[in-house]
């Protein structure tokens, strides 16, 4: 009796453990399938002849080949307004999430207005531009003028607008700050009016005659010493060259390398450092080199014998290698890149940095 009870108990225990094991296996399998589905969803390839990708979701083209958010639709019957599908029977134009017929309505800042009151917008109001003008969001009758000065409208035949203030055109049509003036008699220098009798050119707030003076960094200099500027100094470019605001005699050369001047026949300038040209006229950082023998890869010189193309600081021959994100890969596996991997596009498709077999399609839905 006791032995029979023990055998039954052991049998029941084994069955419970077997069912629990099966349940655990099923749960693990479900989790694996969900994980695989998530990976496929992240890097799904598809055939664009049968599907459309709407914000990362594949949809059958039978419902339409256009997208509105994650929905697909037929644009012959629907219109997408800010992510919402609307039937085209109400109109094919959008105003926010509403659709409308532009023959009867106008959209003013997201609000629909009957076109009977006018087809132009001024803020959320609509109006007829034949009778009104919109000045900074305020409607004004065109009877007073069709030009705007701030929220006021005016007639430019009688007034001019200077920094938002209306001035009578009788005093002049040009503006200098909030003042208006006649440019035949005055010049505006940094917001200050000056009589053109002293000159019509400006140097800061001063006016001058360019026949006698030149303006160097806001300072007036007599043109007798030269018409060119080097900082606040003026000079004659026939005798001097300006290198970073420093004057140098052209006897040593008319080209600049930092604050030094040099003769480009004998020297080359590499990142602010002078190098003798016999070593080469090309630069790699502060070094100069001959491109017939070397190539510059990210600031490092490499012998061209190993290849003229660069992959980071390495050089290589593109006939045998491909550079994928600064990593060299043999072209034997393919000459296209997907992240740091190389592949053959005849057999694979790259979607979001992951390779997928082209058999499922060549387009990506991410």
Image: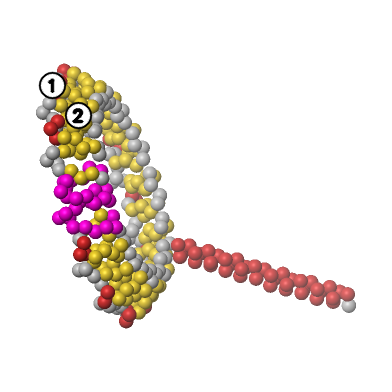
Asked whether residue 158 is drawn in magenta, I would say yes
Q: Is residue 212 left or right of residue 308?
A: left
Residue 215 badge? 2
Q: Residue at x 18, y 57 (%)?
A: 155
Percent position of residue 262, x then y: 21, 22
Local crowd size for mark 2, using a 10 Å CA cut-off: few (<14), some (14–19), many (≥20):
many
Asked if residue 341 is positioned above or below residue 104 in the image, the reply reads above
State whether residue 189 appears in this view: yes
Note whether 333 is above or below 123 in the view shown.
above
Q: Are marks 2 and 1 in contact (CB under 8 Å)?
A: no
Q: Estimate the x, y position of residue 209 in percent, counting from the top left.
A: 13, 30
Q: Which numbered dot is residue 108?
A: none
Mark 2 and mark 1: span between their CA atoms?
Answer: 13 Å
Q: Quadrant of the N terminus?
A: bottom right
- In the picture as drawn, the residue positioned furthest to the right comes out as 1
Magenta residues (range): 150-177
The C terminus is located in which quarter? bottom left
Q: Choose top left, top right, bottom left or bottom right for residue 286.
A: top left
Of pointers 2 and 1, the one earlier in the residue sequence: 2
């Amino acid at each position: 009796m006791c032995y029979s009870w023990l055998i039954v108990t052991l049998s029941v225990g084994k069955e419970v453990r077997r069912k629990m094991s099966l349940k655990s296996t099923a749960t693990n399998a479900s989790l694996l399938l969900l994980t695989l589905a998530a990976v496929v969803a992240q890097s799904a390839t598809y055939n664009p002849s049968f599907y459309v990708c709407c914000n990362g979701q594949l949809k059958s083209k039978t419902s339409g080949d256009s997208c509105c958010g994650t929905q697909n639709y037929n644009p012959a019957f629907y219109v997408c307004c800010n992510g919402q599908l609307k039937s085209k029977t109400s109109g094919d134009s959008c105003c926010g999430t509403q659709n409308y017929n532009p023959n009867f309505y106008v959209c003013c800042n997201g609000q629909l207005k009957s076109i009977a009151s006018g087809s132009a917008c001024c803020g959320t109001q609509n109006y007829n531009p034949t009778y009104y003008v919109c000045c900074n969001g305020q409607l004004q009758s065109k009877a007073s003028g069709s030009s705007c000065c701030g929220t006021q409208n005016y007639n430019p035949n009688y007034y001019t607008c200077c920094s938002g203030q209306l001035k009578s055109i009788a005093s002049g049509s040009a503006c200098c700050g909030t003042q208006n003036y006649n440019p035949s008699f005055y010049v505006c220098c940094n917001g200050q009016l000056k009589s053109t009798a002293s000159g019509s050119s400006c140097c800061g707030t001063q006016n001058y005659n360019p026949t006698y003076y030149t303006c160097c960094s806001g300072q007036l200099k007599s043109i007798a010493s030269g018409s060119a500027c080097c900082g606040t100094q003026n000079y004659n470019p026939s005798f001097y060259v300006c290198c970073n605001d420093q004057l140098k005699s052209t006897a040593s050369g008319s080209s600049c390398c930092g604050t030094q001047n040099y003769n480009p026949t004998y020297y080359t300038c590499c990142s602010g450092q002078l190098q003798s040209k016999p070593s080469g006229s090309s630069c790699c950082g502060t070094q100069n080199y001959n491109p017939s023998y070397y190539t510059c890869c990210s600031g490092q010189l490499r012998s061209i014998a190993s290849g003229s193309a660069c992959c980071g600081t390495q050089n290589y021959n593109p006939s045998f290698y491909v550079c994928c994100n600064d990593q060299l890969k043999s072209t034997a596996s393919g000459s296209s890149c997907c992240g740091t991997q190389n592949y053959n596009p005849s057999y694979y498709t790259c979607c979001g940095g992951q390779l997928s077999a082209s058999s499922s399609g060549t387009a990506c839905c991410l």
